[in-house]
């Protein structure tokens, strides 16, 4: 794997629906719906609309902060 692949930044927006296992390297911002697992040594950033029905195994996970009133 070269340096460009390991430092890649990927985005799956809220209109994306996936069934199965999602694997990536580098960084991924996920704001869609997933029925399955996420596996990565990289960084997963979940968006406000993200729904994951499965297990997450990642190097780090960033979860959006909830606004409390």
Image: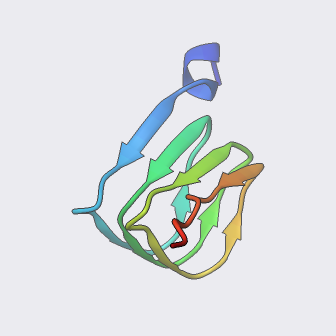
Q: Quadrant of residue 43?
A: top right
Q: Nearer the viewer, residue 13 or 1?
A: 13
Q: Is residue 25 above or below residue 56?
A: above
Q: Quadrant of residue 26?
A: top right
Residue 56: percent from the left, percent from the top?
67, 69
Q: Quadrant of residue 31?
A: bottom left
Residue 40: percent from the left, percent from the top?
68, 52
Q: Nearer the viewer, residue 26 or 63?
A: 63
Q: For the point 52% across and 44% down, which residue is it?
A: 28
Residue 51: percent from the left, percent from the top?
45, 75
Given the current orientation, which residue lies at the most extreme front position? 69
Q: Is residue 25 above or below residue 59?
A: above
Q: For the point 75% across and 50% down, which residue is it?
A: 60
Q: For the point 49% across and 31% down, which residue is it?
A: 9
Query: Viewed as shown, does residue 59 lie left or right of 56?
Result: right
Q: For the point 45% across and 57% down, which residue is it?
A: 47
């Amino acid at each position: 794997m070269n340096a460009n692949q390991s430092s890649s930044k990927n985005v799956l927006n809220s209109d994306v629906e996936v069934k199965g296992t999602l694997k990536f390297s580098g960084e991924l911002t996920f704001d869609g719906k997933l029925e399955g697992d996420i596996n990565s040594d990289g960084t997963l950033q979940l968006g406000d609309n993200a729904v994951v029905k499965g297990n997450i195994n990642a190097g780090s996970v960033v979860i959006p902060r909830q606004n409390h009133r």
